[in-house]
Amino acid sequence: MYNIIEVEEYIRLSPHVLRMEKEKAAKEIIMNTYRNKYLPDIGLILDVIDVKMESENMIIMNDPNIYVKTRFKLVSFTIESGEIVLGIVREVVEYGAFVLIGPFEALLNLSQISDEKFKFNKEKKRLENEDGSKTIEVGDKIYARVSTVSMKEGPAKAKISLTCRTAPYLGNLKWLTQETKQTENKKKVKK
């Protein structure tokens, strides 16, 4: 899930940075401090926006730096167990599919796709059910529930697993669209 977090903080501007415009220097320092960093309480910080400098500055005796009060917003992405997500299939392998969810990659294991049995088709490089009516290929959009999330080693080595078995209306968007159309057609026929 994407979040915007408002932050108020004093930024340290060293004398060599003061050659630049103060606002530009502060923004560069904030970007270098936060962008692409993972903070457990906030998530992966994707960007820093709306950097505003307050008129309040602070100088400390025997410290050549100037501390400038700033307000800014962090754009972050978090993912939690139990969350329903929409992702795009990046790769299909023998044991499942790797799905991109925002900046993270998750694994949808073969056994977690559906109650139906799925297998890997090497020739077509896709996952399919027994009769081939349901498939998962690179580029497909998948609705899934996040079953586990492990960020112990940071976001670069995040371990996220998905399932489509726990609730209706999870799976490949193509199937869900077809199933919805079939249900609507049955309702029309009954009338």
Image: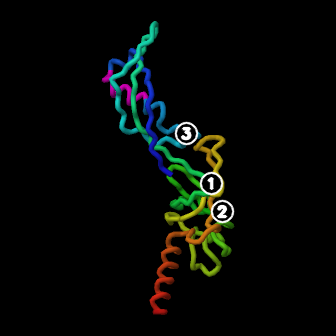
Q: Nearer the viewer, residue 111 or 165?
A: 165
Residue for point 62% across, 54% down: 81
Image location of residue 185, percent across then percent down: 46, 86
Q: Is residue 6 above or below residue 141?
A: above
Q: Which residue is mark 3?
A: 38
Q: Which residues are magenta?
A: 20-29
**Magenta stretch: helix, strand or loop mostly:** helix
Q: Report the side of 171 relative to 4 (left or right).
A: right
Q: Nearer the viewer, residue 113 or 147?
A: 147
Disc 3 marks which amino acid? Tyr
Disc 1 marks which amino acid? Ser
Element carrying mark 3: strand
- Dot 2: within a 10 Å radius of its alpha carbon, few (fewer than 14), some, or many (20 or more) residues? some
Which residue occupies the extreme left position in the image? 21
Q: Which residue is mark 1?
A: 81
Would residue 122 be visible to someone looking at this image?
no
Q: Is residue 174 above or below residue 80?
A: below
Q: Nearer the viewer, residue 109 or 55?
A: 55
Cα gap from disc 3 to disc 1, whole angstroms: 17 Å
Nearest-to-viewer mark from 2 and 3: 3
Q: Are marks 3 and 1 in contact (CB under 8 Å)?
A: no
Image location of residue 50, percent across then percent down: 36, 37
Q: Report the side of 160 relative to 10 (left or right).
A: right
Nearest-to-viewer mark from 1 and 2: 1
Of the image marks 2 and 3, the number of the one nearer the N terminus = 3
Element carrying mark 1: loop
Residue for point 52% across, 64% down: 138
Q: Which residue is mark 2?
A: 109
Q: Report the side of 37 relative to 108 (left or right).
A: left
